[in-house]
Amino acid sequence: MNTTTKRLLMLLPTLLAFTLGLFLYQGIGQDPNKMESSLIGLPLPKFNAQTLVSPSKNVTQADMLGQPALVNVWATWCPTCRAEHEFLLTISKQENIRIYGVNYHDQRPAAQQWLQDLGDPYVFSVFDPKGVLGINLGVVGAPETYLIDAQGIVIDKLTGELNERTWPPLRSQYLSLLQETN
């Protein structure tokens, strides 16, 4: 091996370490709850599904239109969903926020009992036992909350728990959309 090749081989680990460091540095300071969604700026996916509470009643994305709303993906097997549930109840009652649920990969009796025991902040919950609507929404895990405008266009998405810390930016957007609608 000549000296030029040896020098290049000696520089290779340094170059790899620098590249890895640059890649990792880009993630520092980013909000882990702020995951971009390919749906932002697009309408909610079309669906026709049963509601969780009334299996004989079907709903579509059109049933979520008319005013801004949150679409909250939740499940009984999700501990973070349980942690955010009280906050959802609070904002649905105190702030009169419209929230639609998507009960994701769950069992109907368990989910119905959950709402009976803990309270129901949702206008209605779509029952999505196979996760089809969740897949179409691009759900990566529960909970996730989508902000939609009155026409059903996805404005923003929050991955993770909706709470006092994560709510203010969504609330601000929601109130702005509400003013545009009225």
Image: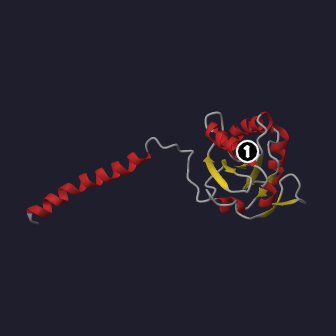
Q: Please provide percent x and percent y for residue 87.
A: 72, 36
In the picture provided, is 180 more to the left or to the right than 14? right
Quadrant where the N terminus lies? Answer: bottom left
Residue 34: image x %, image y %?
56, 46
Q: 10 Å neighbourhood of mark 1: few (<14), some, or many (≥20)? A: some
**Residue found 29% across the figure and 55% down from its top:** 16
**Res. 162 visible in picture:** no
Task: Identify residue for label 1.
Answer: 178
- Point out the residue furthest to the left here: 3
Return the residue nearer the eye: 160 or 148: 148
On the question of residue 137 being in view, the answer is yes
Image quadrant occupied by the C terminus: top right
What's the residue at 76%, 64% (across, down)? 47
Residue 15 vs residue 149: left or right?
Answer: left
The foreground one among 111 and 86 is 86
Residue at (62%, 50%) from the top-left corner? 156
Question: Which residue is at the front of the view, 37 or 151?
Answer: 151
* Residue 2 percent location from the top left of the image: 9, 65
Q: Residue furthest right?
A: 56
Judged from the image, the secondary structure of the residue bearing numbered disc 1 is helix
Quadrant in the picture for residue 65: bottom right
**At which x and y percent is residue 143?**
66, 47
The correct choice, above or below, for 104 with respect to 114 in the image is: below
The residue under the point 82% across, 53% down is 108
